[in-house]
Image: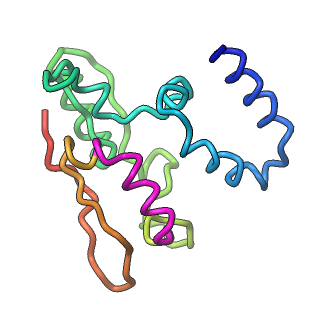
Amino acid sequence: DTITKLSDQVDEFQKVDPSDRPKVQQKYVSEDPLLLAQKHYVNQAEYIFDGEIRVVKNVVHYEHLSEEFNDLMKKYGMNITIPPKHESGVYTSDHGDKRLTFMDLNEESIKIINDYAKADFERLGYKMVDKFEEGMEYNTEATFTS
């Protein structure tokens, strides 16, 4: 049964050396989509749409998380805010130290992401690429809005 299989895989994963976990995680990308969904590998478009019907009224984009979330809370009269990423300890490019970014993805990784998240790219208006080239500018923002 699916629950037993998932439980066994979680137990197996816990035994893996942390440095080897990315390799183990990658093998699940080609699994049965139903099983992936139960592991929370669900495309964002599936949360927003039921077939062709939009079921989520307000969508907050990660690339503008603080601003859009704060505007949404204000719209509903709630005094809740999220500070900007650079003020909250989240890595941003203005930190100056070298960290991995989308530019570090190789063509094989990009293909896996494109194949798996195709619905998100298409429904939410993100642009797919085949590779990233140094010195090129890339728009990582969605055209889909609330």
Q: Taking 9 as reference, is 138 above or below it?
A: below
Q: Quadrant of residue 133?
A: bottom left
Which x, y percent locates residue 28?
Answer: 61, 42
Q: How many marks?
A: 0
Q: Taking 97 as reference, is 32 above or below it?
A: above
Q: Taking 100 as reference, is 31 above or below it?
A: above
Which x, y percent locates residue 66?
Answer: 31, 40
Among all residues in the image, which is located at the extreme bottom? Answer: 135
Which x, y percent locates residue 130?
Answer: 35, 70
Q: Quadrant of the N terminus?
A: top right
Which x, y percent locates residue 2?
Answer: 63, 17
Going 13% across and 39% down the picture, which residue do you hit?
145
Going 72% across and 16% down the picture, which residue do you hit?
4
Q: Taking 74 as reference, is 144 above or below it?
A: below
Colour scheme: rainbow
Depth order, front residue of 111/106: 111
In the image, is residue 112 part of the stretch drawn in magenta? Answer: yes
Q: Quadrant of the C terminus?
A: top left
Residue 53 located left or right of residue 80: left
Going 31% across and 25% down the picture, which residue do you hit?
47
Chief SS of the magenta region = helix
Q: Quadrant of residue 100?
A: bottom right
Residue 22 located left or right of residue 145: right
Query: Which stretch did the figure color magenta?
Result: 104-120
Depth order, front residue of 115/91: 115
In the image, is residue 79 part of the stretch drawn in magenta? Answer: no
Residue 137 located left or right of residue 115: left
Depth order, front residue of 115/80: 115
Depth order, front residue of 85/101: 101
